[in-house]
Image (cartoon, helix red, strand yellow):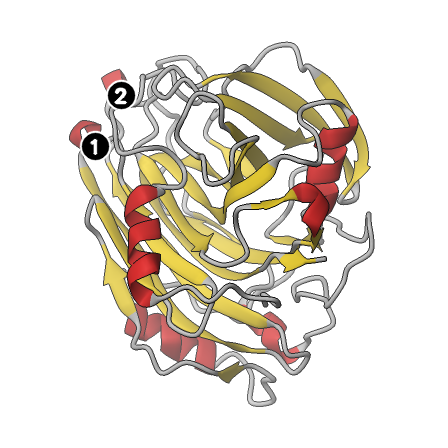
Amino acid sequence: MFRSLQAITFLALLAFAAANPTRFPPVEVASDECGFEDDTPPDPFETTTASIKAASSYATPVTTASVQAAPSAGSSRASSLTTSGFATLPASSASLAVKAVQATSSATTFVTTISQAASDHCGDTDYVVLTDTPWIVYNMLYNADQMVGTQCTNYQTAGTLASGVQEVVWNSVTNIEYVESTNNVPKGYSFVGLTENLENTISSISAIPASYTWTRTNTTAFKGNVCFDFMTSDTKGDSTSTSAQELMLWLQYEGGQLPIGWGDAVATIDSLFGTSWKLYEAKNTGTGITVHSLLPDTQFDGSFDGDLKDWMDALVTIGTFTDSTYVNVGNAGTEFFYGDSILNATLGLQINLS
């Protein structure tokens, strides 16, 4: 997925993982971190499954569920609801997920390209660096002390489509009890992060092709989102100081989650990835970093395909930063507050340099 890759050693990747807890540093986050909602318990919940194209897209690599080599601006769009060939996991077992991927199509064009075994990650800062890929799969529970239950992020497999594009298959299994006093506290972030071609200026990046498909199955009320999350700064490598900026692109959200700075939007961005967006901004009170969250007027139903460089350029246009700003961290994942939920996901994400 990622061309013009940096030569980063395995030890350097581990250092990156330890130094960049991507979504938030591993410190206590204020209870109002991601917005507010009434503290009333959730309504009685009926089991539902939002099934969208996921691993079944391997059989059709030119659909909206697949990465394209160089998507043109505005080529992304919210896909319509469809039935997925990706089996819902009854538990956190990564091996079951691999079997589900392999069973999606007898004519699959997805070829596993790394021999790294599937693995489950359930610790507070638990991760695996994927060799011969530009990714790290990370389970980050930055508010584990306020969580009752379990959360695992599981690496399943990685491979290459017929087009030559790499994708990683992973899942997030959330079993967190609803507790009234902490229902507005985000418990953590489950994600796949980039490890290559970071710390480059926006002007030196030619494209950030991204394909993100997912299915979510909730068996209780669930509060959380699906998003891209990047960190930028005028200083190369800075992702933790108050001079850094966090950029969030929300694709789907539920349960009443709201972004930092919810209220009056500071800007509207039209015709980006097939919809219009509202931009909300405020400081994360736990880190002092300003968060810029873009929320779509029309949520994405389980499939996103586009060039995230268009997102960066749109923020440059409205004056959020300049194109000399460094992109220091980039990832895609899901935030969670409470609920029993399984997110099965397939991600293609890379940074291409000019």
Please rate how many residues cluster around mark 1, counting C-alpha atoms within 10 Å: few if below 14, some from 14 to 19, many from 20: many
Instruction: Name the image quarter holding residue 182.
Output: top left
C-alpha distance separating marks 1 and 2: 8 Å
Q: In which quadrant of the rendered image does the C terminus lie? A: bottom right
Residue 273 seen in render: yes
- Pick out the residue farthest to the top: 264
Circle 2 sits in a helix, a strand or a loop, which is it?
A: helix
Instruction: Give the residue furthest to the bottom.
Output: 106
The quarter holding residue 39 reads top left
State the image coordinates of residue 63 (x, y, percent, origin top left).
Answer: 73, 68
For the point 53% across and 46% down, the residue is 199
Above or below, 312 against 244 in this view is below
Tag shown at residue 330: none
Look at the image and tell me in which quarter the N terminus lies: bottom right
Of the residues shown, which amino acid type is indicated by label 1?
Answer: Met
The residue under label 2 is 182
Does residue 222 show up? no
Q: Circles 1 and 2: CB distance less than 8 Å?
A: yes
The residue that label 1 is drawn on is 147
Query: How many residues crowd around disc 2 within 10 Å: few (fewer than 14), some, or many (20 or more)?
Result: some
